[in-house]
Image (tube, rainbow, N blue to C red):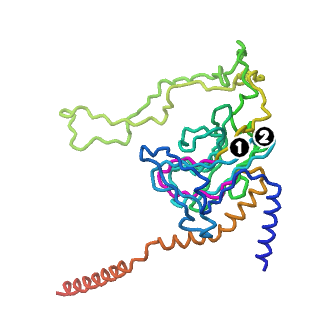
Amino acid sequence: MEARCASSVFLLLLLSSLCHAKVFFEERFDDSWESRWVKSDWKKSEDAAGEWIHTAGKWFGDAEADKGIQTSPDARFYAISAEFPEFSNKDKTLVVQFSVKHEQNLDCGGGYIKILGGDVDQKTFGGDTPYSIMFGPDICGSGTKKTHAIIAYNASNHQMKKEVPCETDQLTHVYTLVIRPDSTYSILIDNVEKKKGSIESDWSLLPPKKIKDPEAKKPEDWVDDEFIVDPEDKKPEGYDDIPAEIPDAEAEKPEGWDDEEDGVWTPPTIPNPEYKGPWEPKKIKNPAFKGKWKAPMIDNPDYKPDPELYVFPSLKYVGIELWQVKSGSLFDNILVSDDVDYAKALAEETWGKSREAEKKAFEEAQKKDEPPADDDDDEDDSDVKEDKEEDTEDTKEHDEL
């Protein structure tokens, strides 16, 4: 009864959010999904294009609701896109959200989506097609396990300077990018905020506000030597007379050594513990030291603030374009909206509803894949034990004989 009431309350919240949200694109990949998506011919002529499978995968919470599109086969390029009514996010929040499940335990490949604008030939959509946003996980070996957040500005692509680790297990996870009209952003994974900040500070879209003064010169009397030789330090008398090696006092002439035939025996040498190496005067703090000289910072004449740093004038397509060594990534529940609350509610209504059942199904699948205990090994061990006992008895009888 409590679960039913909670579900009803959640549905009301979702409907309330939907009343205020503007949904530009939402795809849950039902059976009619192919009518909305265009598969690109990119890489087909090279026989390197992968296919998309409509499936809920090997483990899921709901066989129908959890269906998405999955990459197949291995070592292929993938490109597919869908169009929505063109818009600009000027003066409004932009939310990009989707879920992805790497069933193949992804070792090298992308799991991100792209948002594109302008006129795109969807049949040739590929790696060189300009885009506005690229967002989502990217994994390759132990060195790359991050969430890409690349945005286009002035016809150039800019990667976020901060690192946001991505999820690396084989379960479904939801990735959300929020860009606000005040040029701030948030990145959420599974409805939990992982990073937030300013677009201007966390992307190198604009020239820096301050630069080193190119006209500044270090003063001629500037002292930047932190240490100097101690003028009071003098070399001790007889320091240079201390040898680096001395005869080994514990060495003895070998027996049978004949000085006439073998020459005069001399003991081998060993390092002299009194020898301290070439003498160097000690160093002391320089009383005239002023610190390391740095050019003063001045306002950058090339810097101009851009209040529309967050704006994408044209957003018109959702695309998935990636390379995967090992296929099996499953994309679902793609959303482009202006409402963060609706995005969170949608994530809970889809991923949140299935995650526990999916996790249980995954754990069951893992158990089935575990190799069974080898009873033959126990039998072999028993045989070995019996053989050893027989050998022991034979040994006893031999000793008695």
Q: Residue at x 74, y 53 (%)?
A: 23
User: Quick check: 279 above or below 352?
Assistant: above
Query: Residue 368 versus residue 384: which sits nearer the camera?
Result: 368
Amino acid type of disc 2?
Lys
Q: What residue span does the magenta drawing correspond to? A: 318-335
Magenta stretch secondary structure, dominant: strand
User: Quick check: 53 above or below 82?
Assistant: below
Q: Residue at x 79, y 58 (%)?
A: 18
- Is there CB contact under 8 Å for labels 1 and 2? no
Q: Magenta span has 38?
A: no
User: Quick check: 142 above or below 244?
Assistant: below
User: Quick check: 20 above or below 44?
Assistant: below
Amino acid type of disc 1?
Glu
Residue occupying the far front of the picture: 35
Quarter of image, res 363: bottom right
Query: Relative to 36, is 388 on the left or the right?
Result: left
Give the residue pinned by disc 1: 86
Q: Position of residue 124 (x, y in %)?
A: 53, 42
Residue occupying the far top of the picture: 220
Q: Position of residue 94 (x, y in %)?
A: 75, 47
Q: Residue at x 73, y 29 (%)?
A: 208
